[in-house]
Image (cartoon, rainbow, N blue to C red):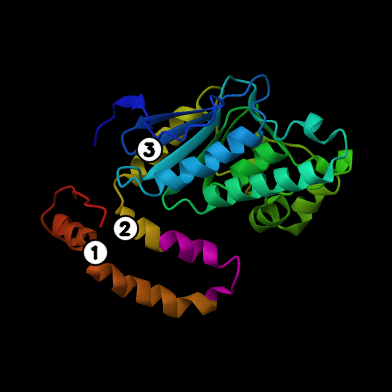
Amino acid sequence: MSNAVEPYKSAPFDLTHKLTVEKHGHTALVTINNPPANTWDRDSLIGLHQLIEHLNRDDDIYALVITGQGSKFFSAGADLKLFADGDKARARSMARLFGEAFEALRDFRGVSIAAINGYAMGGGLECALACDIRIAEREAQLALPEAGVGLLPCAGGTQHLPWLVGEGWAKRMILCGERVDAETALRIGLVEQVVDSGEARGHALLLAARVGRQSPVAVRAIKPLIQGARQRGPSSWLAEERERFVDLFDADDTREGVSAFLEKRDPHWRNR
């Protein structure tokens, strides 16, 4: 697998310089680049949505890492100036764009990792919650503070956070406005790893590279099964789990993976 770093030529639809994309082997590295706080706006949300759609069609991309530019902010979420005039039409449009972008991120067919390199607030934390795995630097601060300004999390926060940390901690963070540091986030299950300052991106890329050793076809079959328990009880997925196991025997990757194991060599995935 190549470790070369190169700009990712996503497509002519690139709408904004507020998202930068590089390709690291089979990983797309997405950097939120909207200083000073890496806030999300209309263009960056549309750009993320369209980028994910493109990555889903790129057979050479197995994983995605998203991080923030600089050392202080992963993302501070939405710029509140957008809502200062109380325009309900704008609020509805932005809520829809947030939902579409982060739901696309949640449903990315590969593995997504948030490298939280600073403050992840409001929509910034909701972006991280939409990812499969979260790695935070020790100085990171995480919060959903919307109720403190008379709003509520509208990009999955009220649903994804309690799934990860339980109802009690979700209520502490959302209803009581409690901000948590990286060590607390690790303890309650909000993040899976804490690393030193400046190391989240590197650790996330290393973890993403491990995805390249997995069959991308198998990953695409497994991820919806894991996430499906959010909608239905685990027992209701058992029969489907068995069927998807059998379905994999139609894939070139399954034959290659088994053969490579028996022949004591690395597999060469065909992604089909």
Observer-nearest of 191 and 107: 107
Mark 1, Cα crowd under 10 Å, few <14 / some 14-19 / many 20+, is some
Observer-nearest of 42 and 24: 42
Dot 1 or dot 3, earlier in sequence: 3
Mark 1 lies on residue: 251
Asked whether the residues under the numbered discs 2 and 3 touch, taking CB atoms below 8 Å apart as contact, a structural biologist would say no
Residue 111 falls left or right of residue 131? left
* Residue beneath the point at 38% across and 30% down: 8
Whole-Å distance between the Cαs marked 2 and 1? 8 Å
The answer to whether residue 75 is above or below residue 163 is above
Residue 187 falls left or right of residue 150? left
Determine which quarter of the picture holds residue 68.
Answer: top right
Residue 165's x, y, as percent?
68, 53
Residue 29's x, y, as percent?
44, 32
- The kind of residue tagged 3 is Thr
Which secondary structure lies at badge 2?
helix
Residue 34's x, y, as percent?
62, 24
Q: Is 225 included in the stretch rendered in magenta? A: yes
- The kind of residue tagged 1 is Ala
* Residue beneath the point at 54% across and 73% down: 234
Mark 2 lies on residue: 217
Whole-Å distance between the Cαs marked 2 and 3? 16 Å
The answer to whether residue 226 is above or below residue 160 is below
The answer to whether residue 239 is above or below residue 33 is below
Mark 2, Cα crowd under 10 Å, few <14 / some 14-19 / many 20+, is many
Dot 2 or dot 1, earlier in sequence: 2
Asked whether the residues under the numbered discs 2 and 1 touch, taking CB atoms below 8 Å apart as contact, a structural biologist would say yes
Mark 3 lies on residue: 27
The segment highlighted magenta reads 222-234
Quarter of the figure that contains the N terminus? top left
